[in-house]
Image: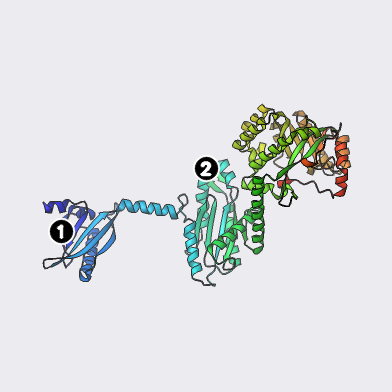
């Protein structure tokens, strides 16, 4: 019975004598080596695999019996078909006058496979099979720990430009394939000592080690950028992509991975906010810019929490009757000292940080809080325009919530939503899905800054809007510019045929106004000539004629140097 129990044990059990010869081999041990028990004692085993395995076991037995120590090893067994891993424990014993080695082994192949899978998930990217951030961080840390100033390396952050647009246009499967192909191109020509890592969705980290100087790194990255500009052919699509690269050097730009990574990241965002598709090395001036940006970001977040935003209103004037047709709400920020900050200092950052949605809702709340004063000043019939960023216009979730908020005011027909033409051309869902919500409420739609985006007369023919605002770049000195006059007439004629009201933006001089009145059929205009933006606390009941609004502000306008008519966010009005 004992013999049968040992033979049938699920653990692989063997007993070897002082010469390493096998005295006992149970069925599980025979299965471990894919051979019957009698082959373990054969002088000529039937396969090279078994010969090597038995020789290794004999060497182990002789070593452990001589030293008298116990040992546990992992044994990898491959019979050409499958690879298995066994955890084998050896224990020397003396039974009677014999020195024997008792060995038992358990198949841990499944546990090892799971452990290997968990290791790969922790330290390697599943999509590209590149090491993760922690691997490259460990490697960089080991180099720094050697404390050899001559052991220089470069750390480069790479971010794929406009990857979200690529994903939106081609779909996520092609986006994933692009990441794989991108990683392959980045990995070409890397040395054994270099390392490439994918650290987030569209960001990669490259460690170049060793390097001699900045010029060497710059030349390599220039070649890399050229390679990345070539099109990617994926599933029948020709995809173009580029990368923005920020670089820091050890030891010049930091003595720890954290500082080096932070500085490379700062440099990367510097180039991403400027030219894109280029490589920039970190310098100390970038750090002060980054700190200023962080301070602005912090102030912006606190301002939203504290509701320190206010609205200024600029009239849209009927240049024939001098009536005020409507007003545009322009958001401004009060800093900690109560000083009004222009939108150019915070609007782009609000969009980038995802705070613009909350800011737009705050503007609507400010308007409704002062609606009685607005009505007394500009008239209950004046439309109220609110700007919506192009990024918001394509966001169905935000636009649905915003439409609901306008409906909840009880006077949705008073409102006009101003968006740039990009929302119509680049975001077809805006025209198809979002516009009908606002149309149903009676909310007007205005195309802001027309002429500086994706403008074309054919695109204008497909746009369903109530109002088109011609960008001030066409209006400035219009009386002196025949080519702009021709463009203005074309936009005017087509807009009139399509039933859209035309508004000339940025009228600042009497000559510009005179030209619009005498040489065009344009009826409405907006700009500093009529009124600079008026703040809520300055609003006083007054007649609804643009000349009287201008006269009321004349004293203030002469006391202050009139600022240039500026637009925030690359031409966007806020």
- What's the residue at 86%, 39% (across, down)? 513
Q: Secondary structure at mark 1?
A: strand
Q: Position of residue 165 (x, y in %)?
A: 59, 44
Residue nearest the observer in this picture, 548 or 152: 548
Q: CA distance from mark 2 to mark 1?
A: 59 Å
- What's the residue at 24%, 62% (across, down)? 52
Question: In this rendering, would 399 be left or right of 147?
Answer: right
Q: Position of residue 90 (x, y in %)?
A: 23, 62
Report the colour scheme.
rainbow
Q: Secondary structure at mark 2?
A: helix
Residue 221 lies in quadrant: bottom right
Residue nearest the observer in this picture, 250 or 428: 250
Question: In this rendering, would 359 be left or right of 515?
Answer: left
- Report the residue marked by disc 1: 24
- What's the residue at 44%, 55% (across, down)? 123
Q: Position of residue 105 (x, y in %)?
A: 24, 57
Is the residue 229 above or below the residue 536 in the image? below
- Report the residue marked by disc 2: 172
* Image quarter hosting the C terminus: top right
Reading the chain from its start, which is encountered first: label 2 or label 1? Answer: 1
Does the CB distance between marks 2 and 1 fall below 8 Å? no
Q: Position of residue 211 (x, y in %)?
A: 55, 67
Question: In this rendering, would 18 be left or right of 378?
Answer: left
Q: Is residue 535 visible?
A: no
Residue nearest the observer in this picture, 238 or 109: 109
Label 2 Cα crowd, 10 Å radius (few <14 / some 14-19 / many 20+): few
Label 1 Cα crowd, 10 Å radius (few <14 / some 14-19 / many 20+): some
């Amino acid at each position: 019975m004992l013999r049968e129990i040992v033979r049938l044990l699920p653990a692989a059990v063997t007993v070897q004598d002082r010469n390493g010869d096998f005295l006992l081999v149970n069925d599980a041990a025979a299965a471990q080596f894919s051979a019957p028990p009698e082959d373990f004692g054969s002088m000529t085993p039937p396969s090279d695999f078994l010969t090597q395995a038995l020789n290794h076991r004999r060497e182990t037995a002789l070593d452990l019996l001589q030293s008298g120590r116990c040992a546990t090893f992992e044994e990898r067994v491959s019979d050409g078909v499958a690879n298995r891993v066994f955890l084998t424990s050896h224990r020397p014993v003396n039974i009677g006058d014999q020195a024997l080695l008792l060995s038992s082994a358990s198949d841990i192949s499944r546990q090892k496979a799971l452990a290997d899978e968990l290791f790969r998930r922790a330290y390697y990217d599943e999509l590209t099979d590149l090491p993760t951030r922690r691997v490259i961080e460990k490697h960089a840390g080991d180099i720094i720990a050697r404390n050899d100033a001559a052991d220089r390396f470069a750390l480069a952050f790479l971010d794929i430009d406009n990857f979200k647009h690529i994903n939106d246009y081609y779909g996520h499967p092609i986006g994933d394939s692009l990441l794989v192909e991108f990683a392959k191109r980045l990995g070409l020509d890397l040395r054994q000592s270099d390392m490439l890592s994918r650290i987030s969705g569209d960001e990669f980290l490259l460690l170049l080690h060793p390097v001699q100087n900045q010029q060497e790194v710059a030349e390599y990255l220039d070649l890399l950028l050229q390679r990345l500009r070539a099109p990617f052919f994926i599933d029948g699509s020709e995809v173009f992509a580029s990368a923005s690269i920020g670089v820091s050097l050890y030891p010049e730009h930091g003595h720890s991975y954290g500082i080096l990574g932070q500085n490379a990241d700062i440099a990367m965002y510097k180039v991403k906010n400027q030219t894109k598709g280029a490589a920039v090395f970190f310098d100390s001036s970038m750090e002060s810019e980054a700190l200023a940006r962080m301070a602005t970001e912090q102030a912006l977040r606190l301002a939203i929490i504290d509701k320190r935003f206010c609205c200024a209103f600029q009239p849209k004037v009927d240049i024939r009757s001098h009536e005020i047709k409507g007003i545009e709400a322009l958001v401004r920020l009060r800093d900690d000292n109560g000083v009004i900050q222009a939108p150019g200092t915070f609007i782009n950052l609000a969009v980038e940080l995802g705070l613009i949605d909350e800011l737009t809702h705050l503007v609507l709340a400010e308007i409704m809080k002062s609606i009685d004063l607005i009505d007394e000043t500009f008239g209950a019939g004046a439309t109220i325009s609110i700007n919506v960023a192009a990024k918001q216009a394509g966001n169905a979730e935000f636009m649905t919530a915003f439409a609901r908020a306008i409906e909840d005011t009880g006077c949705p027909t008073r409102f006009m939503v101003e968006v740039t033409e990009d929302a119509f051309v680049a975001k077809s869902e805006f025209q198809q899905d979002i516009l009908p919500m606002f149309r149903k409420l009676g909310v007007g739609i205005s195309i802001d800054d027309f002429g500086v985006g994706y403008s074309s007369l054919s695109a204008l023919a497909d746009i369903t809007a109530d109002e088109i605002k011609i960008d001030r770049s066409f209006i400035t000195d219009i009386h002196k510019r025949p080519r702009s006059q021709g463009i203005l007439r074309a936009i005017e004629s087509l807009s009139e045929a399509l039933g859209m009201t035309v508004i000339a933006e940025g009228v600042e001089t009497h000559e510009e106004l005179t030209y619009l009145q005498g040489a065009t059929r344009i009826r409405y205009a907006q700009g500093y000539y009529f009124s600079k933006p008026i703040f809520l606390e300055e609003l006083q009941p007054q007649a609804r004629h643009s000349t009287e609004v201008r006269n009321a502000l004349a004293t203030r306008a002469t006391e202050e140097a009139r600022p240039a008519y500026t637009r925030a966010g690359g031409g966007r009005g806020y």
